[in-house]
Amino acid sequence: MKTAARTIDIAKNEILRDLIRDGQVHVVRLQLQTMFGELPQWADERLGNAKMPDVDRWAKKVLAASTLEDVLRKKQSSQKRTHLQ
Amino acid sequence: MASGRPGDLALAMLANGGPDRVAEIIRRAKDLSWPERQRVMAQLVLLCGLRRLTGRLTMELKTMGATIDIAKNEILRDLIRDGQVHVVRLLLQTKFGELPKWADERLAHAKMSDVDRWTVKAVKASTLEGVIGKK
């Protein structure tokens, strides 16, 4: 994006990032509501706290998912295995 | 800064920098005509975001009883729309594969109302044309 004075790096601008993310979340919310009806509170909260990579992941999952949980399930954290020698 | 012109207000913040200027810029912007005020407030939002002054901006807006109407501010509204279009593109690519050029162009010119309509249609449509219309 260019202003009269300088070029703005969206990735480094937290307000711009938040505005774009709000737009992304709006579409995912609408998609989920169309597929699964009114969203429960836990889903609403998860959407409210979403980061950009979450939104992309959910957008790819949403059309093939058969439940809300399939889409919004938290990413499995890779657990480190400790090998005792 | 003394001139009160919108460009000067934003440049003042860039040049003199500082968090202390935020309140003054908001106060001066309130006296501007509607289109000029919108432009200044958009610039202020962008600059505060860039300089990590978001907290300060929010505080000053609250203190001064000022608001920024994002829906009426075309620069800020476009950013939200860009985020919406990004997700609709992802949805359509996931469902129909790589998008043809005409679909890409239609997405690029989408309005917020188009995005909502296409999002709802994408659930049931079996073709790309069924979502965003004919070529």
Image (cartoon, helix red, strand yellow):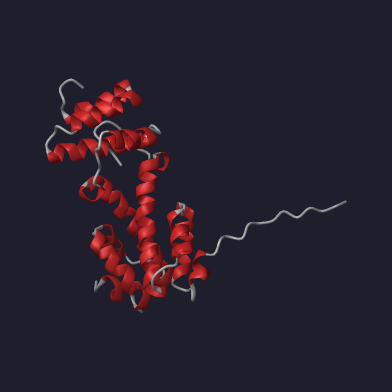
Observer-nearest of B50 and B60: B60
Q: Position of residue B46 (x, y in %)?
A: 31, 38
* Quadrant of residue B129 within the rendered picture: bottom left
Would you identify the image quadrant in which residue A48 lies? bottom left
**Is residue B89 visible to us here?**
no
x and y, in percent, of residue A36 in the image: 42, 74
Q: Position of residue B45 (x, y in %)?
A: 30, 38
- Name the quadrant of the C terminus of chain B: bottom left
Q: Is residue B58 visible in this depiction of the protein?
A: yes
- Which residue is depicted at the point 25% across and 26% down? B24
Task: Farthest residue to the right: give it.
Answer: A85
Left or right of B22 in this view: A46: right
The correct choice, above or below, for B60 with respect to A44 in the image is above
In the image, residue B125 above or below residue B112: below
In the figure, is residue B111 to the left or right of A56?
Answer: left
Vertical placement of B116 versus A84: above or below? below
Quadrant for the N terminus of chain B in the image: top left
Question: Which residue: 45% across, 53% down?
Answer: A52
The count of marks equals 0
Q: Position of residue A69 (x, y in %)?
A: 52, 69
Give the residue at x 44% y 64%. A59
Taking depth in this image into account, of B104 and A9 the one nearest to the observer is A9
